[in-house]
Amino acid sequence: MDTILVNQLPVRTWNRLGVNETALPWDQAASRELEQTHIAAKAGGQETVRLSVQGEGEYSEKSVVVDAAEGSRVTVYEDLRSRQHLLVRTQMKVGPGAKVRLVQLLGTEQDTVLRNEVSGTCQQEGSVELLQVLLGRGDVYTDSRFTLKGDGSALTADMGYLGQARQVLDMNLVVDHYGKKTASRIDASGALKDAAKKIFRGTIDFKRGSSDSAGSEQETVLMLGEDVVNKTVPLILCAEENVAGNHGATIGELDDDTLFYFESRGIDRQTAENILARASIERLARAVGDREIEEKIINGLNEEL
Amino acid sequence: MAENKEKTYVEDVDRSVYDIKDVEHDAYRMEEGLTPAIVDKLSKEKNDPVWMQQFRLQALQIYHELPVPDWGPSIEGLDMEHIATYVRPNTKMQNNWENVPRDIKDTFERLGIPQAERKSLAGVGAQYDSELVYHNVKDSVAAEGVVYTDMESALHGEYADMVKKYFMKLVTPRDHKFAALHGAVWSGGSFVYVPKGVHLSIPLQSYFRLNAKGAGQFEHTLIIVDEGASLHFIEGCSAPKYNVANLHAGCVELYVKKGAKLRYSTIENWSKNMYNLNTKRALVEEGGTIEWVSGSFGSHVGCLYPMSVLKGDNSRMEFTGVTFAGAGQNLDTGAKVVHIGRNTSSYMNTRSISKSGGISTFRSSVVVEKGAKGAKSAVSCQSLMLDSESRSDTIPAMDIRTRDAAIGHEAKIGAISNEAVFYLMSRGMSEEDARALIVSGFADNVSKELPLEYAVEMNNLIRLEMKGSIG
Amino acid sequence: MKSANLLEVKDLHVCVEDKEILHGLNLAIGYDEAHVLMGPNGTGKSTLGYAITGNPAYTVTGGQILFEGEDITALPVNERAKKGIFLSFQNPLEVPGVTLSAFIRSALEQKTGSRLRLWDFKKKLSETMKLLSMDESYAERDLNVGFSGGEKKKAEILQMLMLEPKLAILDETDSGLDVDAVRTVSEGVRLFRERTHGSLLIITHATRILEALHVDAAHVMENGVVVKNGGAALVNEINENGFGSLK
C-alpha cells in the first residue's frame, strides 16, 4: 500500500493548517486499468456522450480523453458513482472556439474512495463549463486543473455538495490564466451535516501577459452538523497588472435574516435547513438541462436523506 | 534635511535620512556564528539569571533541530553563521536625553525622536544596536504605576517573577526556527506592565535601529495589560543600508487581560537589505480587545503575521494593515487568529501594493475551534498592482470546526482605475500625482488609525515610492 | 369565542439593540378591514410590522399582541405565520438555491400540514402569476436573486395571494416602484381583499397604492406611538397638509 499526495496547493502555506496537500493511502500496484474512452468532435461538429463508470475490482482506474476540434460543441455526462476504489482521469483539449461541457456526478459507497482528476487546456476562444455534484457516503477527492492558454478562453466551474456522516470531501481547483481576455468563474456551494469534513482549495492564477482577464471565486458553506469541519483556501495569484480578480466566502449556519424570512412564511428552522441543504445540488441539477441527469441527481439526493 | 530631487525614472525610496552610517566606535562585538559557547558568553555578559541562561541554551538546541520553513519567501541570502548577534555600544543606559553620547544622539535626532518626545509622548525607549540606549519614562506615567523599562532590567528588578512567568510562553522556541533563534540570542527590547484599571491616554513608543555591519537584531517586547486597563503602544523602526544581509528576528508577546484593551501600532521601515522575520502574538482574555495597526514598507524579505489567540469569551481582534512592496522586496505579511472562547470576533482589513517588481503576499489563517460558539470573523483584503513586473498573491485559509459561527471572507485584486485617474486629471492634477493620491487613499485604512506624525511619515513614504511610477 | 378584533396591539413597548422604538403603542384591526399606517420616517412603522410578525431582533419589553383573541406576544415567527400573519418585506432577501416555486410550496405545505399535489400547485401558481403580470420563468428562478425592485415586490404579493393569510402587513410595498408596477401590486392587493377577505395593514408614507383600494381606517404614528386615528379622510388630510397639521 502506497501513500500518495493529492490535491496539492500551488503555493504552500502553514503546514499546521493541513491544507497544502492530502496524503491518501492508495494501492497503485493493485489498480486495474480500465479501457480508455476517447471522445472526439470534428471541426464544427457536435457530440454528446453519456458515461457511467463504477470501477472493477478493489482498485481500478479509467482515463477519458476529450478532443474538441475547432468550433465544436461537446457535452459529456459522467456518472462516476462507484462501489470500489476508483480513479477517473478526464483530460480535455479544447480547440479554438470550441465549447466543452463536462457534467460529473461524483460519489462512492461508504469505506471506499473516489479520486477524480480533471484537466483541460483551452485554445483561443475555447471554453469549458464544468458542473460537479458530490453525493454518496464515501470519501471523494477531486482535483481539477485548467489552463486558459488562448486569448479569450474561459472556464466556469460550479460545484455542489452535501457532506454527511463522517464523509471526507476534498476538493482542489486551479485555473491558470495565460491568454489575454481570459475569464474564469468558480462557484462552490454546499452543506455539511453530522461530522462531515470538507476542504475546498480554489486557485485563480493570473500569469504575466494575461491582461484584461477576470477571475472570480465564490464559496458558500452551510454548516449544519455539530461535528463538521470546514476548510476553505481561496487563492489568487497575480503577476499581471490589468486584471480583475475577486473571491468571497461565506461560512456558517442558517443566518438570522434568511431564517426569519422562512419562518415568516411558516417554515420552521429544521425544514428550512433541509431545504437549504439540498439547495445547491438541486440548483445544479436544474442547470444541467438534461432530464436524465437531473433525475439521477435528485434520486441520489433523495436516497441520501 | 536632504533635498528631494524630482525623479523621472523608477528609483528606490529616498532614504538618505535613514542611511547614515555612523562610524562604529569601539563597540564590543561577539564573534560571528552560533555555538553554545557564544550563547553562554552572551548570557554571562548580560548577567542573566540562571533560568534564562538555561533557557537560551535549550532554545539554541531547538534552533539546530528545526528546519527552515518550506513555505514563504526564500531566505537563501541570509547566512546565519556570519551574522554577529550582539553589538553593544560603549554607553550605559540613559535616563535623560542630555546625557546620551553625541553621535548616537545625532542619529536619533535626525530620525525625529526628540521632537516626538517634546510632543509629550509618555516615554521613549530607543534601541541602538541591541542595547537600550535611551530610556525615559515620564513622571506621570510612572506615577500611575505603569512600568516601562528595558527587558534586561525587568529580569532582575521587582518584576522579575512576572517576566519569568510570561517570557516566551506565548511564542515558544518550538514554534519555528526563528523563534528558537530568538530564544537563544535575544537582547534588548521593552517590558511594559499596565496595572488594573489604568488607562494611558498617551501612546508609548519605542524605536529600533541596526547600525553595525552584519548585525542581527533580536529584541523582545513583553507587554501585559492588566484587567480593565488600556494602552496604545507604537513600534516604529528603521535601519541603514548595507551590502551584507541584515536580520531582524524579534519577538513581541502581548497579554491582554480581562476587559483590557491594547492597540499595537507598527510602521516597519527597515532598509532594503533586511530580512525581517518578526514574530508577534497576543493572548486575549475574557472581554479583552487587541487592535493591530501595521504598515510594512521596508526590508528585502519580510515575514510578518501577527497572531491573536482569542482565549476568553467575548474577546476581540482587529487587524488593519498595509504593505507596500517595491523593487527587490518580497513582503509576505498577514495575520492569524484562533477563536477559542465563546462569542469571539475577529476583523481583518488589509491593503497591499506591489510596484517595480516587488512581490507582496497576503497570508492569513482563521481557525475557529469546536468550542468557539458564536464566533464571528470577517476578512477583507485588497491588492493593488501598479505594473506587470510585480506580483501580488493572496493566500488565505479558514479552518472552521463549529456550525455556530459566521465567517466571511472577501478579496479583490486589480489595477488603479483609469477612470479615477482621468477624473483627478480632469481636475488639474498630473498623472503622477493622481496615482500617488489614489495609492495614498488606498492605504488610508491604516493611516487613519495612526497618530498624525506616523500617518504623515507613511504618506510621505508612499509618495516617494510612487515617484517615477510613470514610464 | 371569536374576538371582535383580528389584531389588538396593547400598550406595546419594543426595543432594538437596547433602544426603545415603540413607547406603548395601541392599535386595533378588525376582520376584513384595510388599515393604513402613516408617519414620518424613523417613527417606528416598520418596527411595528416586525414586532407583530415576531422578528427576534425586536424585543417586546412591555404590552401585548393579541391575534384572534390569543396572546401571541411570545409565539415564534413560524407559528404566527401559520396562524395567518403575513409580512410583505420592504427589502426582500435573496435566497440562492431555493426557487420561488419551491419556497411557496414549502410554506403551503407547512400551513396545511400535508404534501401538495404538484399539478394543482403549479396550476394555481401559474394563474396567480398571470394575474400579477409576472413572467412564468420567475417561478423556477432562485428566490429574489437578480430580481429588480419591482419584481421582488411582486414576488411578495404573489406569496401573499398563494398563502391567503388572515392579516397581511405590507411594509412600504409601493416604494421604489414605477407606475406600472404600482398598478400591478395594487391590483394584487385588491384581489387579496376580494378573494380572501383578509385584513390589511398597509405601512406607507406615499399613498399611491391606496388609490384603487377602499380604506377602512387610517392611523398616524409619531415617535413610537399612534397619535391619531381616523377614516379614509385622514389619509387625504395628511396628503394635503403633511404631518405637521396634526398638532
Image (cartoon, rainbow, N blue to C red):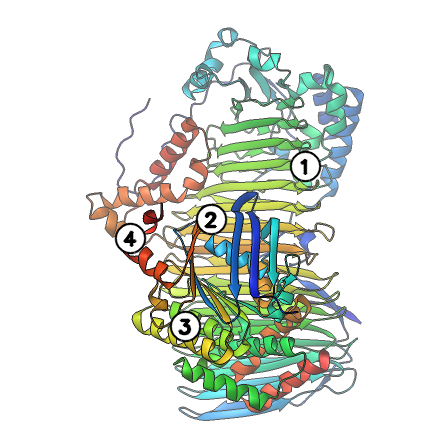
Q: Which residue is mark 2?
A: B359
Inter-mark Cα distance, 4 to 1 = 61 Å
Of badges 2 and 4, nearer the viewer stands 4
The picture places residue A165, in percent across and down from the top left corner, at: 76, 70
At mark 4, the secondary structure is: helix
Q: Which residue is mark 3?
A: C151
- As shown in the figure, which amino acid type bears the numbered disc 4? Asn
**Taking A5 as reference, is B333 above or below it?**
above
Using the rendered image, report if marks 3 and 1 lie on a common chain.
no
Inter-mark Cα distance, 4 to 3 = 33 Å
Q: Residues within 10 Å of mark 4 (few under 14, many from 20)?
A: few
Q: Quadrant of the N terminus of chain A?
A: bottom right
Q: Which residue is mark 1?
A: B283
At mark 2, the secondary structure is: strand
Q: Residue at left 45%, top 57%?
A: A238
- As shown in the figure, which amino acid type bears the numbered disc 1? Leu
At mark 1, the secondary structure is: strand
Question: What subunit carries mark 2?
Answer: B
Inter-mark Cα distance, 2 to 4 = 65 Å
Quarter holding residue A191? bottom right
At mark 3, the secondary structure is: helix
What number is the disc on residue C241?
A: 4
Inter-mark Cα distance, 3 to 1 = 50 Å
Inter-mark Cα distance, 2 to 1 = 31 Å
Q: Earlier in the sequence, mark 2 or mark 1?
A: 1
Do we see residue C135 in this rendering?
no
Of badges 2 and 1, nearer the viewer stands 1
Q: What residue occupies the far top of the structure in this picture?
A: B99
